[in-house]
Amino acid sequence: MKDYKPELEQVRNDFSLLENYRYITSSDNNKQAERSALALAIYYDLKPSDFEIVEFLLEQEYQLRKSATPGDVDELYFIAFVATMFNRVEIIWLFLKIKNIDFDSGIGFDGQYIFFMGVDATYKYAKSLENPEKTKLLKELDFWYYPDDHTDEAIAEWKHDKLVYFGLITEEKHQDNRVDVDEDDVKDIVSYPVDDDDLPLEEEKEYWDYNDELLPDTKGKTWWQKLLGL
């Protein structure tokens, strides 16, 4: 894996270098791997001044997702999670843009991102704004707010679960660093309308070879480790 800490220091000293991480629709390289690696370097060496860097990276992921260009949505989720670590409530404007891209984003992009600062703090921020931004934001918050999902305890649990999901902490580790996962439950989640038991052997193998990407890796690698070649 390329060490992105030197690149991070260069970007910190010269924000114009962020152009190297911009999503360009006409390019064959969507720069997701580069953006994710830079965000990961920030996660391990976070400074308050890095907020603008992460905000730029997340904006590029938003542009990529909005364009419907093929890409890995987990990159967007990860960079958004790093953005929450700065406790800058104004990032929810960008979170809401992502949440409202389309139906899939409305479902897939967790509502907890919007209330990551806590419900009270988020509504306090919205009410501090001047109209029309105040009315617009309050309407959005009311639409996405679910009492059971957005308690302080639920938000704290969500943050912990995200750390596990992104491989930043581990739970119930095996010797090979895998996290316990019930593969039958995973198969239920990734199963398609077709019953794989009814597939011919070769088709069944191909079917599960595809879905195996969502099952625990025997080497214990997380999604970003695979992406970055760790």
Image (spheres, rainbow, N blue to C red):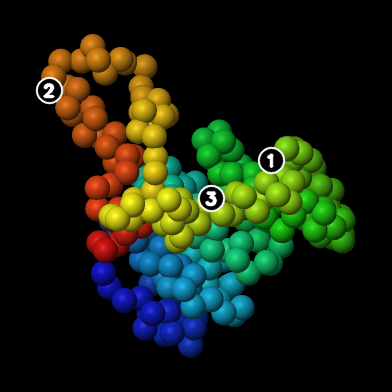
Measuring 49% from the left and 70% from the top, which residue is drawn there?
A: 43
* Frontmost residue, 53 versus 221: 221
Distance between mark 1 and mark 2 Cα atoms: 42 Å
Q: Are marks 2 and 3 in contact (CB under 8 Å)?
A: no
Badge 3 amino acid:
Asp
* Frontmost residue, 113 versus 13: 113
Q: Is residue 91 above or below residue 13?
A: above
Q: Is residue 34 above or below residue 163?
A: below
Q: Residues within 10 Å of mark 1 (few under 14, many from 20)?
A: some
Give the secondary structure at mark 1: loop
Q: Is residue 51 visible?
A: yes
Specify the label residue 71 is tagged with.
none
Specify the label residue 149 is tagged with.
1
* 209 relative to 4 in the view: left or right: left
Q: Position of residue 87 (x, y in %)?
A: 67, 66
Specify the label residue 202 is tagged with.
2
Q: Residues within 10 Å of mark 3 (few under 14, many from 20)?
A: some
Measuring 30% from the left and 15% from the top, which residue is drawn there?
A: 195
Q: Quadrant of residue 208?
A: top left
Q: Which badge, 1 or 2, comes first in the chain's sequence?
A: 1
Q: Position of residue 120 (x, y in %)?
A: 82, 54
Q: Which badge, 3 or 1, comes first in the chain's sequence?
A: 1
